[in-house]
Image (spheres, helix red, strand yellow):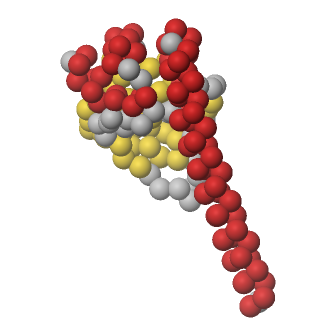
Amino acid sequence: MLSRDVDLMRSIPLFSHFSEDQLRLIAFSAEPIEVFAGTTLFRDGSRARGGYVVTAGEIRLTPSDPDQSELDVGPGSLIGELALFAPVTRPATAVVVADARLIDISRDLLLRVLDEYPDMAKRLQKFLSSRLELLVRDLSVAERALLNADDFVFRSG
């Protein structure tokens, strides 16, 4: 089971930068949990202490923002990536749709692994920096599109 969990974690972009030994350490030290359909894993606004890797089953994420759609996630999904690095509140409620198996990875565990492997921390920093750069670029494009839409509405109104 540990080997299968490590393979699954490796398929997740965040964990793809970790070595086999580092992934084994995380998978071995994290808490495997089983949850049944209908169980609420966490509620919107609750304090997050880490993330979950879905190894089996299905979880429905319902955001508090009514303009956002629900999202169903299954094996190979990471729920709560940001919570692995910083104290945050959950932006959605997670309910188990189909009996699920999860790897519960605490922020403390991930930070201990990064302390133990500073080279990994540097690689992860580069990866996250590039993702943040892309996000900022996408937000800038969206901002320009919204400003242009406002100009259009204003001029045509």
Where does the image place residue 83, in percent across and percent down from the top left? 56, 28
The residue positioned 58% from the left and 42% from the top of the image is 130
Q: Would you place residue 55 above or below residue 23 in this image?
A: below
Asked if residue 147 is positioned above or below residue 140 in the image, the reply reads below
Question: In front: 32, or 151?
Answer: 151
Residue 148 place in picture, x, y as percent: 71, 76
Q: How many marks?
A: 0
Q: At x 58% / y 29%, what residue is drawn?
A: 125
113 or 37, which lies in front? 113
Q: Quadrant of the C terminus?
A: bottom right
Q: Is residue 43 visible?
A: no
Looking at the image, which residue is at 66% across and 71% down? 145
**The quadrant where residue 26 appears:** top left
Q: Is residue 40 left or right of residue 132?
A: left
Image side of residue 42 versus residue 141, left or right:
left
Image: 114 above or below 137: above
Compare residues 48 and 116 and report the one nearer the observer: 116
Name the residue located 74 percent from the left edge and 91 percent from the top edge.
156
Q: In the drawing, does residue 3 fall left or right of residue 117?
A: left
